Amino acid sequence: MKPYICRALFRTALVVAALGAGGACAFAQEAGGIWMRDDGAARIEFSPCGPALCAVIVWLKSPTSKAHVGQQVFFDMTRADQNSWTGKAFNPEDGKTYSGKMTLSGNRLKTSGCVLGGLICKNVTWRRAG
């Protein structure tokens, strides 16, 4: 085989290998769907709301909670990077809205409601339901 053909085939193989390896790492995780709080107290469902994600409560273990089914608890959550979002979080227990962050890792979702520019945060871990 001619040397210039070998070089062309080698370069083509390198490009194909690089695209294949890079493509596997470039997929962003999606947070849509139903999530159960790690203590089993609630389930929320994330779905698109305009260009962002929002979540409403779809199930509660205790009917005496200040929260109620259908209540929106996360809104305006926009993607910060491949596996995290920022927006707003509503806490039904105190009736206040906080700056919200969430990070997805496999079937685990960590959400945070923060005050004072993120200096004080309350974290909750969720697992994908179903």
Image: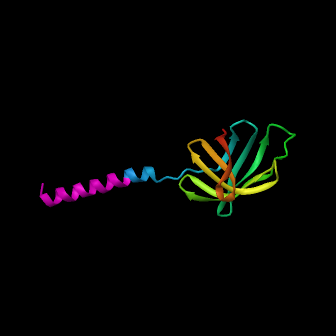
**Number of callouts:** 0
Say whether residue 100 is magenta: no
Q: Position of residue 76 (x, y in %)?
A: 69, 60
Q: Position of residue 58 (x, y in %)?
A: 77, 45
Q: Would you say 98 lies left or right of 106 here?
A: right
* Farthest right residue in view: 64
- Residue 108 vs 7, above or below: the answer is above
Q: Quadrant of the N terminus?
A: bottom left
Say whether residue 3 is magenta: yes
| x 79%, y 55%: residue | 96
Q: Which residues are magenta?
A: 1-19
**In this view of the protein, which residue sits in the foreground, 18 or 118?**
118
| x 59%, y 49%: residue | 103
Q: Quadrant of the C terminus?
A: top right
- Residue 80 vs 65, above or below: the answer is below
How was the colour assigned to the protein in this rendering? Answer: rainbow
Q: Position of residue 37 (x, y in %)?
A: 70, 40
| x 17%, y 56%: residue | 6
**In this view of the protein, which residue sits in the foreground, 79 or 93?**
93
Q: Is residue 110 visible?
A: yes
